[in-house]
């Protein structure tokens, strides 16, 4: 046992759990966002031909598994949002401050995009004679009510299929996130931390059970994939991690094992996938148990990055400038990447060898999505984000513990103030 502990200390040198400062910005979590959006881009935009070359096969497998990037976003949101809410629970302006700060981060880009898609783009496409684009925009415009109300995921669930035009299909996850933002503050404030943990466990089990039951009764996989209740295991896995780090007993005794659990879980995930395709998109395995297993691995990854010292190779990897830059602009990249991909694909790439065209299209999409996102950040999002100065979080005094419900014993805790997404 002592030998195993020494090996763990050498391979995964962690910070002193008692001195963790969750209120500070954790650069590695920007890298997590970057990885998440990179996975999504690979899944949506990296379409490689199977030439039998081993590196190509590995790249195809990685791209085909990129759907888990959305799961990673969900787990990270659950961790950060729950942490913010726990740290401010019981303080004056708890709900108002949270909603206003989330609104100036999320709404400008989201509703700005809807205005372009529903009002401006149809006129431009009609004037330029882009008939196919005009038809797709007209089709999505017929269901615009759902998008204005952040309800499009329930529209897809009800229809049991993705809309043909695929203009705003990826916005389903933004609806899930927004519904979580609206409901979760009330859940957190209504529960003690122990009860909140049980609520999270219950929602994880409910999501898994409901997905399995619906799938085995012939409900389309799209329905289980996009409904908020069937995706709560990913969000609640992150929430459980946030609760655990704010529970001194658990943090001092069990947190140190997160790196080992992460490494073991990752290996097991790949091993299980060989025999039961839990990483294959749109498969029964992925739609059922796959989401839950992926959420567990991602939660341990996030916990590991919070614990590891800045000099550890894994921390340095996730602090790599390329990943953190993608992470900083991940929201806008996610919003714009499919529009950019369509534009890039419309260009004639036949001047390149066929084997290189898919890579060229992907790289061009990645670079242009970043550039568009950066422009959006500078010209559109930043002015709205500047308004946050007028809506500070009610947690300025970190020496005073937030009110814990049911009069449980209060502990002075560190706080994470990093914004999600």
Image (cartoon, rainbow, N blue to C red):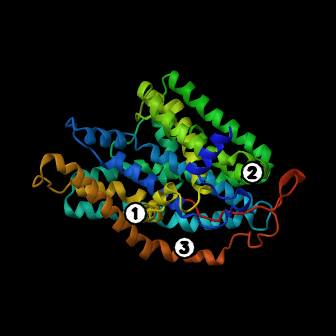
Regarding mark 3 in the picture, which secondary structure is present there? helix
Pointer 3 residue: 385
Q: Is residue 68 left or right of residue 178?
A: left
Regarding mark 2 in the picture, which secondary structure is present there? helix
Q: Is residue 314 left or right of residue 163?
A: right
Q: Closer to the camera: disc 3 or disc 1?
A: 1
Q: Position of residue 178 (x, y in %)?
A: 57, 54
Please rate how many residues cluster around mark 1, counting C-alpha atoms within 10 Å: few if below 14, some from 14 to 19, many from 20: few
Q: Position of residue 259 (x, y in %)?
A: 59, 46
Pointer 1 residue: 322
Instruction: Determine contact: label 2, label 3, CB under 8 Å.
Output: no
Q: Is residue 163 left or right of residue 256?
A: left
Q: Closer to the camera: disc 1 or disc 2?
A: 2
Pointer 2 residue: 252
The residue drawn where x is 77% and y is 61% is: 413
Name the image quarter holding residue 283: top left
Question: Which residue lies most toward the top here?
Answer: 217
Q: Which quadrant: the N terminus?
A: top right
Along the line of sight, the residue nearer the viewer: 244 or 95: 244
Q: Position of residue 114 (x, y in %)?
A: 43, 60
The earlier-in-sequence mark between 2 and 3 is 2
Q: Position of residue 177 (x, y in %)?
A: 56, 52
Question: Which residue lies most toward the front here?
Answer: 3
The earlier-in-sequence mark between 1 and 2 is 2
């Amino acid at each position: 046992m002592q030998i195993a502990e020494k090996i763990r200390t050498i391979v995964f040198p962690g910070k002193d759990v008692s001195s963790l400062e969750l209120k500070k910005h954790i650069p590695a979590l920007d890298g997590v966002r970057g990885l998440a959006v990179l996975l999504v881009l690979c899944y949506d935009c990296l379409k490689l031909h199977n030439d039998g070359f081993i590196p190509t096969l590995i790249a195809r497998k990685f791209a085909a598994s990129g759907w888990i990037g959305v799961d990673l976003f969900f787990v990270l949101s659950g961790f950060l949002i729950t942490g913010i809410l726990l740290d401010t629970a019981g303080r004056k302006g708890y709900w108002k401050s949270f909603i206003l700060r989330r609104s100036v981060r999320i709404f400008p880009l989201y509703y700005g995009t809807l205005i372009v898609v529903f009002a401006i783009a149809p006129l431009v496409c009609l004037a330029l004679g882009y008939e196919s684009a005009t038809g797709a925009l007209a089709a999505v415009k017929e269901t615009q009510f759902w998008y204005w109300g952040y309800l499009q995921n329930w529209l897809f669930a009800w229809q049991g299929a993705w809309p043909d035009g695929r203009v705003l299909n990826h916005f389903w996850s933004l609806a899930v996130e927004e519904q979580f933002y609206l409901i979760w503050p009330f859940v957190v404030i209504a529960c003690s931390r122990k009860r909140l943990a049980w609520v999270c466990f219950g929602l994880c089990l409910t999501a898994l059970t409901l997905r399995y039951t619906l799938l085995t009764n012939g409900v389309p996989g799209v329905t289980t994939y996009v409904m908020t209740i069937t995706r709560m295991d990913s969000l609640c896995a992150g929430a459980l991690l946030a609760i655990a780090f704010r529970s001194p007993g658990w943090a001092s005794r069990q947190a140190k094992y997160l790196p080992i659990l992460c490494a073991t879980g990752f290996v097991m995930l790949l091993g299980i996938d060989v025999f039961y395709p839990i990483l294959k998109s749109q498969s029964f395995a992925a739609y059922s148990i796959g989401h839950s297993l992926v959420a567990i691995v991602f939660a341990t990854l996030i916990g590991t990055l919070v614990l590891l010292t800045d000099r550890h190779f894994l921390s340095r990897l996730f602090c790599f400038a390329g990943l953190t830059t993608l992470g900083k602009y991940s929201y806008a990249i996610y919003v714009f990447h499919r529009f950019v991909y369509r534009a890039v694909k419309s260009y004639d790439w036949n001047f390149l060898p066929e084997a290189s065209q898919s890579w060229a299209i992907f790289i061009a999409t990645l670079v242009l999505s970043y550039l568009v996102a950066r422009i959006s950040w500078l010209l559109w999002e930043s002015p709205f984000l500047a308004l946050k100065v007028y809506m500070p979080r009610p947690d300025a005094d970190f020496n005073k513990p937030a009110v814990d419900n049911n009069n449980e014993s209060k502990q002075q805790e560190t706080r994470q103030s990093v914004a999600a997404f």
